[in-house]
Each structure stands twice: as C-alpha cells, then as structure tokens.
Image: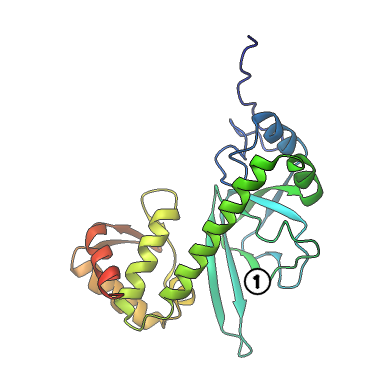
Amino acid sequence: MPETQLPQRCEVCGCAKLCTENLSLFRELPMAVQERLTAQAVSTHHVRGSRLFQQGDPIDEIRIIRRGQVKLCRFDTDGREYILDVLSAGNSIWEGIFRPGAEFVYDGVCLTDVELCEVRRPVFLAEIAGKPEVASYLIGLLSIRLAEAQEKALLLTIRDPRVRMAGFLLDRDRRWPGPEINLKLEEIAASIGLREETVSRVLRGFEKSGIIERMGKGKIRLRDRDMLREISEGGRA
C-alpha cells in the first residue's frame, strides 16, 4: 500500500499548512485537489481602509483571509453604514461563486492590513467538476449559510437591545478566533442596528453584571455565556 502523502506547505504564502485545509468550503476536497488549488492561488496584500471589492463588482474568485479583518457592509441612501459581517483570518469570501454573472451586493473593506490567497472561479469549478459527493456537501454548506443569514435577520427584528446584543455576542464568540471578540463600538452598532450610545450602555450593564469583560481597544471577553444564552433565549420566547 502506498504511503499517505502529508499535506504540503503552502507554496503561495509560505504557511506551514495549506490555506484551504480548515476552511469549510474546501474541507471535503481531496488533499491533492487542495494542493492544486493553492498552487494556482495568488497571494495579495491590502492596506487598512482599502476596498477589496464594492457592490456591483463581479464575483470571480474565492478570497481566503490569511491575516487581518474584513468587514462586509452596505450603505443606505442617507449614507448610513450597515455591517453585514466582520471576517477574520481563517474565513473566506465565496458566496455567489457558483452563479454565472454573479455580482457582490455589498462592499468588502479592510479593517486592518489584510493578506489574502485568491483562487479564481474557473480554477475552482474545474477542480470540483464531476465530483457529486462534493456537490452534495456544498449544497449542505449553502443551506447552513442560509440558516445563519435567517437567524441574523431574526435577531435584527428583536426590539430589546439587551437581547439583541446577547445574541450578537454569542454569534461572534462562536465564529471569532481567539479568546476575545475584537470590535469597536461603532462596528457593533452598525452590525445590529443600534446607536453607539445604546451599545455602550448595554455593554456597561453586562460588564457590571460580570457577564463580559471589556479589555480596551475594542476587545471583549465573555465571562458568563450561560447568562448570555438565558438573556438571548428569554427575549425570543
């Protein structure tokens, strides 16, 4: 029996392992396919405040975030910003990649300096063609993304700011790498449709109750997740 080949070092960015290895979009692909994808990827660097793309741009590649943070946002007719999500290292931007002619419906803005690995749409589609098991997995993955979007839409309909904040913090804690959530007041406010003053007041209350710890520079550490869940679920009953 031939030896199992160990995952190769990423040749594009020099990482100790493939950028695709722990990403949900690529996880079910054979390692040989992941190696071919990363070998054809392009490494790019973007400075803080720059736009990766804007609403109306074609979706023609998968963007893997290796370092930094990217916010996905939209603006209303009055210029008010709504943050749809904040993505950090280990996430990827790929929704719409399967629809020919698809365009972004939001902007992607770098909150910090950002490093990406970018895989072109034709390259990815060619590698998954003729693999029904991968297609089935991707359908399931898209269903999960849809459920997450519906959950966030439901969160924004809740009037009680404490309940809305509790649900938001639990969601960010689940998806954020590391022990702290790293978001500024204005970013939280734009994410859940609250005023900055309201966000600050709710966070102060949570901190006073021992539910969270505010560590400065936008860092928040959750201390009592059970209480946050109680607040979140109690407000939806």
* Residue 124 vs residue 83, the one in the foreground: 124
Residue 5 in the image: state x and y as whole percent: 63, 19
Residue found 25% across the figure and 72% down from its top: 234
Residue found 62% across the figure and 34% down from its top: 18
* 206 relative to 124 in the view: left or right: left
Q: Is residue 114 above or below residue 129?
A: below
Residue type, label 1: Tyr
Picture quadrant where residue 167 is located: bottom left
Residue that sits furthest to the left in the current view:
209
Residue 97 in the image: state x and y as whole percent: 72, 57
* Residue 11 vs residue 35, the one in the foreground: 35
Residue found 62% across the figure and 42% down from its top: 26
* Residue 20 vs residue 25, the one in the foreground: 25
Q: Is residue 143 above or below residue 57?
A: above
* 35 relative to 214 in the view: left or right: right
Residue that sits furthest to the top in the current view:
1
* 125 relative to 72 in the view: left or right: right
Residue 13 in the image: state x and y as whole percent: 67, 38
Is disc 1 surrounded by few (<14), some (14 to 19) or many (20+) residues within 10 Å?
Answer: some
Q: Is residue 187 visible to the viewer in this orientation of the structure?
A: no
Label 1 belongs to which residue? 106
Q: Quadrant of the C terminus?
A: bottom left
Q: How is the image coloured?
A: rainbow
Residue found 35% across the figure and 72% down from its top: 165
Q: Is residue 70 visible to the viewer in this orientation of the structure?
A: yes
Q: Quadrant of the N terminus?
A: top right
The mark total stands at 1
Q: Is residue 81 above or below residue 177?
A: below
Residue 134 in the image: state x and y as whole percent: 65, 42
Picture quadrant where residue 29 is located: top right
